[in-house]
Amino acid sequence: MTTTAAIDFVARARALAPTLAARAAEAEALRRLPDQTVAELREAGFFRMLQPSRWGGHEVEPGVFFEVQQLIAAACPSTAWVMGVVSVHSWQLALFPLAAQEEVWGKDSSALISSSYAPTGKVTRESGGYRISGRWSFSSGCDHCGWVFLGGFVPPEPGENRPPDMRTFLLPRSDYKIEDTWHVAGLKATGSKDILVDSVFVPEHRTHRLIDGFKRSSPGNEVNPAPLYRLPFGQIFVRSVSTSAIGAAQGALDAYCAAAAQRVAAGDGSKVAEDPTTQVVAARAAATIDEVRLVLQRNFSEMMAAVRGNQDLPLERRVRYRFDSSNAVERCVAAVDALFTASGGRAIFLGHPLLRYFLDVHAARAHYANNPDKPARNSGGVQLGLKNVDYVL
């Protein structure tokens, strides 16, 4: 990935942002991204940023990819959320056996994949693969995707004394139904609907083991040798669902400053921008956004330097990276809450520019991966000499 190409993706995101912001209300009314938005994301090449070059992808540096996600989130958090998670699925498909990659991208290299990783379905072993059934929720962007990743536990063979094997199962659109359950308060336009599967066979090559992603030894590494694909699965995935919160905080700050600059206090006619509290809230929000951005970029710089040098990624650092990802969301929520509170009663009205960011950042915090409590305990425990208890790292 050249510097010129990297800068170009950022420039494309900046250029598209005003259009996405203007379309945000329409997207929320649809409860999914408009077809035009998806077409524009495709045209900009955003869905291919993490896709292998052998399949027409760009193999972009993670720091660039997540910068693009932040820029889009500042305009429309829902659009950034879908762009982020769907793009990361192209990165994960690169870890699957070559046969699965050929099955998806051999027919259409622009194919998109949605997901629902929570292992809520039933999995049984069959000759050559597995049979799965059940309901999976929160499949963001599924209306625009021809494939889906679903999480599930593979039971051990009879007589084996080991825990179930956590895997991702890849299914084509013909093997599942979408049920429209997405009636929500935040991230309304993500279209994160339910996926229903009724006794479908999934061949072995269309599965990916979580432990392989943790060990950085997936089947796809043999055919996609770029350093990008030697990063741990957990580090890429968790950032795809936390980084939109950083952009949402920036969007909230921009909206706050624009509104405050024009506001006059109803009580005494003073300029709100001259109020010390207004100024302090803006300064603190800007500082928080800078800090979480810098930590994200530092972490991926460290990881990329390690994989380029064929060095190990110390578990202590991976545990910390995982906590940093979830902690960024918590801090962004606090920053947006302060901006919202300082905006006064007008901020609660539908159509106020701050309200969308307030609702969306709280919806992002509700994602399981964005709860910082377990990652914090794990990080602190490892520092205190205890064993790691998290393998989504």
Image (cartoon, helix red, strand yellow):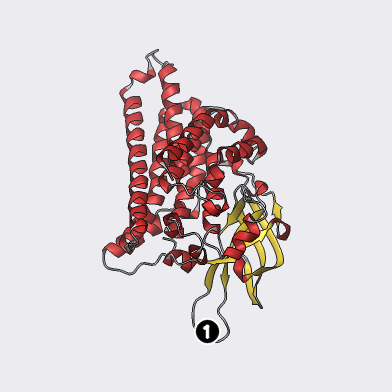
Residue 228 falls in which quadrant of the image? bottom left
Say which residue appears at 66% left-offset and 51% top-offset. Answer: 108
- Rendered residue at 58%/32% (across/down): 24
Give the answer, above or below, for where 338 lies relative to 266.
below
The percent position of residue 241, horizontal first and vertical second, equals: 49, 49
Q: Is residue 101 left or right of residue 337?
A: right
Residue 350 to residue 112: above or below: above
| Frontmost residue, 360 versus 145 | 145
Name the image quarter holding residue 29.
top right
Q: Is residue 295 visible?
A: yes
Q: How many marks?
A: 1
- Image position, residue 196 (x, y; %): 69, 59
Residue 230 located left or right of residue 20: left
Q: Amino acid at mark 1?
A: Glu
**In-front residue for pair 308/273:** 308
Residue 92 left/right relative to 183: left
- 127 to 99, vertically: above or below: below
The furthest residue to the top: 269
Quarter containing the C terminus:
bottom left
Q: Position of residue 220 (x, y in %)?
A: 52, 63
Residue ID at (58%, 85%): 158
Label 1 packing within 10 angstroms: few (<14), some (14-19), many (20+): few
Residue pushed farthest bottom? 159
Q: Does residue 248 appear in the picture of this structure?
A: no
Which residue, given by chain and number where applicable, does mark 1 sit on?
160
Residue at point 67%, 47% (across, down): 143
Measured as percent of width and height from the top left, residue 255 is found at: 46, 27
Which of the 4 image quarters holds residue 38? top right
Q: Is residue 15 above or below residue 206?
A: above
